[in-house]
């Protein structure tokens, strides 16, 4: 379910944000660019901490509580959500922002599903 959410939400969010964007706003676009860069770097760093297969919680011998996991239970998902938030900010798209907000319940479903595994 996670892969479906990622593979469908990003292209849709990008399309809607560009198509219905209000052009670049100096403040919102700048914040969006910074958030995009930082969240991409954080997601990459978190993903590279565990080079072996780590698709399921059972792939880890114990509950992770070190590094970014001491701050947030799902730091990779948090970074992806911030990354998605940055897309409508960059293009100053209210509709894109509403689409992003509508994706949050799906992220919560994915997180809860993984917690049960």
Image (tube, rainbow, N blue to C red):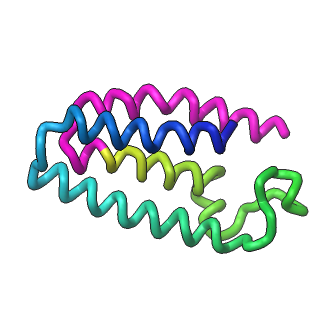
* Quadrant of the rendered image containing residue 40: bottom left
* Quadrant of the rendered image containing residue 59: bottom right
* Quadrant of the rendered image containing residue 97: top left
Horizontal side, residue 55 vs residue 80: left or right: right
Name which residue lies at 66% across and 36% down: 110
Horizontal side, residue 22 vs residue 70: left or right: left
Residue 92 drawn at (x, y percent): 18, 42
Image vertical order of residue 58 relative to residue 23, above or below: below
Q: How many labels does the image show?
A: 0
> Which residue occupies the foreground of this view, 73 or 51?
51
In the rendered structure, which segment of residues is drawn in magenta? 88-117
Name which residue lies at 27% across and 54% down: 32
Image vertical order of residue 21 relative to residue 40, above or below: above
In the image, residue 94 lies in the stretch drawn in magenta:
yes
Residue 44 drawn at (x, y percent): 55, 68
Quadrant in the picture for the N terminus = top right
Residue 14 drawn at (x, y percent): 35, 43
In the image, residue 46 lies in the stretch drawn in magenta:
no
Name which residue lies at 82% across and 35% down: 116
> Which residue occupies the foreground of this view, 43 or 11?
11
Name which residue lies at 21% across and 32% down: 20
Residue 68 drawn at (x, y percent): 60, 65
Horizontal side, residue 62 vs residue 30: left or right: right
> Which residue occupies the foreground of this view, 13 or 25?
13
Quadrant in the picture for the C terminus = top right
Chief secondary structure of the magenta portion? helix
């Amino acid at each position: 379910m996670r892969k479906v959410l990622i593979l469908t939400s990003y292209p849709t969010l990008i399309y809607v944000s560009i198509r219905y964007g209000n052009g670049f706003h100096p403040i919102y676009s700048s914040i969006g660019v910074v958030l995009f860069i930082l969240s991409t770097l954080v997601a990459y760093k978190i993903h590279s901490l565990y080079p072996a297969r780590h698709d399921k919680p059972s792939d880890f011998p114990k509950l992770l509580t070190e590094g970014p996991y001491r701050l947030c239970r799902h730091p990779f998902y948090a970074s992806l959500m911030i990354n998605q938030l940055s897309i409508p900010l960059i293009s100053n798209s209210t509709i894109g922002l509403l689409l992003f907000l509508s994706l949050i319940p799906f992220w919560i479903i994915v997180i809860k599903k993984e917690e049960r595994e």
